[in-house]
Each structure stands twice: as structure tokens, then as C-alpha cells.
Image: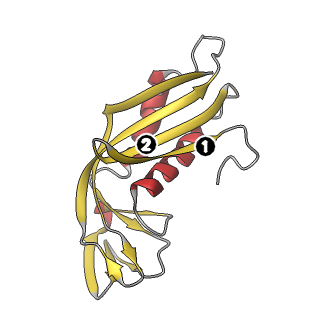
């Protein structure tokens, strides 16, 4: 099986986030996230696992929704999210923020961690890469060089999209 990789400097985003749990919360802060995408499989009739010129815009489209945004966990029971006109109001841990809607991306997760960012990105890439020669997709998200998380999805499994 082959492994094809595209990563930083092709894929990077700047985004703000915070982690909220039962009884604690981080301050809103940001990172310059470095992203790596790996596609595993066999060569197709063009002798490629995946065409870099097709993979790159696909990933950039997904990351474009996150870049220069505040990433909000949309499935956290400790966070109240309310959309009012052109604003998104966020309330948690006694704090209240009003942000322009265009500067917010609400993700379907309980928290915005590198683990969850890697999982969401992997699933979204897998939804778009449906070629039969692709067997596995792994996305990694790094807050800093050397500190990050990866998620691997076996594309041939019956529960391909978790």
C-alpha cells in the first residue's frame, strides 16, 4: 500500500478556540495550526493514489471555513450559543461574548481540541474522496510543531463515516 502526503506549508490555518468542561474553561486563544493529510491506497489507472491537484483544493475548501475564525463547539452542554442577526452570542462559565457571525465557525463537537479537529477534517475529506483505490485517510492537526493529534479512518470499513 502507498502513502501520499500533503502538509504544511500547503495546509495551515489561524484560528481561535477554547476548551470548556464541567467546572473549567480556557480563555479564548489562538494558534497557527499546521495540517497534514495522508491518503493510503493502491495506484489507480494513472499510477497515483490520489492526484495532488485534486486533493489540495478539496482540503483547502474545508480549511477555508475554519481559517481566521473563532471555532465554537456546537455540541457542548456547558455552552449556550445564540444567533442574533449578524452576531453569534456565546455564553459559558459566567462569560459572554458577541462575535460577528462571519468570524465564527460552529463545529459539531463537544470541544475544539486538536483531536476533534483532526477527526472532523478526516471525516470531511473521506466524504469527498470516494475512489475505490483509497483504503485509509489520516489527518493531523498541530497546535505547534511537534504537538498535535491525528485521526485515521479506514475507508473500506462499514462504518466509514463515524
Q: Which residue is mark 1?
A: 153
Camera-side residue of 111 and 59: 111
Residue at 45% x, 54% y: name it: 115
State which quadrant residue 79 falls in: bottom left
Say if 152 sits above or below 80 in the image.
Answer: above
- Secondary structure under badge 2? strand
Q: Which residue is mark 2?
A: 140
Residue at 45% x, 27% y: name it: 5
Residue at 37% x, 40% y: name it: 35
Q: Quadrant of the N terminus?
A: top right
Camera-side residue of 146 and 77: 146
Q: Quadrant of the C terminus?
A: bottom right
**1 or 2: tag closer to the N-terminus:** 2
Lateral position of residue 18 relative to residue 119, left or right: left
Residue 78 picture location, percent across and down = 43, 82
Residue at 28% x, 41% y: name it: 145
Amino acid at each position: 500500500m502507498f502513502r501520499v502526503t500533503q502538509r504544511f506549508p500547503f495546509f495551515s490555518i489561524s484560528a481561535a478556540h477554547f476548551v470548556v468542561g464541567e467546572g473549567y474553561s480556557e480563555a479564548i486563544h489562538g494558534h497557527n495550526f499546521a495540517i497534514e493529510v495522508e491518503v493510503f491506497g493502491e495506484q489507480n489507472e494513472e499510477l497515483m493514489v490520489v492526484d495532488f491537484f485534486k486533493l489540495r483544493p478539496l482540503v483547502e475548501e474545508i480549511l477555508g471555513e475554519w481559517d481566521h475564525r473563532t471555532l465554537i463547539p456546537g455540541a457542548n452542554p456547558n455552552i449556550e450559543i445564540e444567533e442574533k442577526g449578524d452576531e453569534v452570542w456565546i455564553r459559558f462559565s459566567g462569560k459572554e461574548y458577541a462575535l460577528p457571525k462571519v468570524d465564527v465557525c460552529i463545529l459539531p463537537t463537544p470541544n475544539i481540541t486538536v483531536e476533534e479537529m483532526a477527526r472532523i477534517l478526516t471525516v470531511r475529506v473521506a466524504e469527498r474522496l470516494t475512489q475505490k483505490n483509497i483504503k485509509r485517510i489520516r489527518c493531523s492537526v498541530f497546535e505547534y510543531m511537534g504537538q498535535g493529534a491525528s485521526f485515521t479512518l479506514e475507508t473500506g470499513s462499514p462504518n466509514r463515516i463515524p
